[in-house]
Amino acid sequence: MHHFTARIEWTGNTGTGTSAYTAYERSHVLSVDGKGALACSSAPAFRGDGSLYNPEDMLLYSVAACHMLWFLHCCADAGVVVTEYVDTPEGTLASDAEGIGRFTEIVLHPQVTLADASRVDELAALHAKAHRHCFIANSLSTSVVVR
């Protein structure tokens, strides 16, 4: 069993706290002991600062990074040498009439370069194995698709 901790601190009090929905900033700082702090906000669609990371960005990053790390592990175990890996994950967030939202789908688009291009036919099975092992995807109720 593994245990992880983090700290999140709201830094958006402009002087009147949450006296009104428009009276405060969505800025906050994410930190983990022994690591640098990360300035964050909500997404611009939710009155946030678009120049900062938001929870939706980090969810996509978490799913894509976990998949990539498992995929690289699976490739190493299979003797498939990856020389480059780039992904551009996308997520669709939908909200109902009450404003309750959820991601309805996350799609990963990994682009993989191999040292031996003749082994490209093995990639689908290796991606499937990585997906089965991905801690983050296994923790979500939404569909995660690897294309």
Image: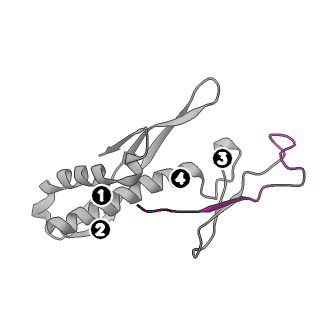
Question: Residue tagged by mark 4?
Answer: 57
* Type of amino acid at the residue the image marks with label 3: Pro
Quarter of the N terminus within the rendering? bottom left
In percent of width and height, residue 69 lies at: 34, 63
Magenta-highlighted stretch: main secondary structure? loop
Q: Residue at image x 19%, y 70%?
A: 81
Q: Residue at image x 52%, y 55%?
A: 58
Question: Residue tagged by mark 2?
Answer: 84
Image disc number at residue 111: 1
Above-or-below relation of 117 to 146: below
Badge 1 vs badge 2, beta-carbon distance below 8 Å: yes
Distance CA(mark 2)–CA(mark 4): 22 Å
Question: Residue tagged by mark 3?
Answer: 44
Q: Is residue 100 magenta?
A: no
Q: Is residue 5 magenta?
A: yes
Can residue 88 be seen in the rendering of this structure? no
Distance CA(mark 2)–CA(mark 3): 32 Å
Task: Please tell me which of labels 4 and 3 falls first in the chain.
Answer: 3
Image disc number at residue 85: none
In percent of width and height, residue 45 lies at: 65, 42
Quick one: 7 or 44, which is closer to the camera?
7
* Type of amino acid at the residue the image marks with label 4: Asp
Badge 4 vs badge 3, beta-carbon distance below 8 Å: no
Above-or-below relation of 100 to 27: above
The span shown in magenta is: 1-23
In percent of width and height, residue 72 lies at: 27, 65
Secondary structure beneath dot 1 equals: strand
Q: Is residue 130 left or right of residue 81?
A: right
Secondary structure beneath dot 3 equals: helix
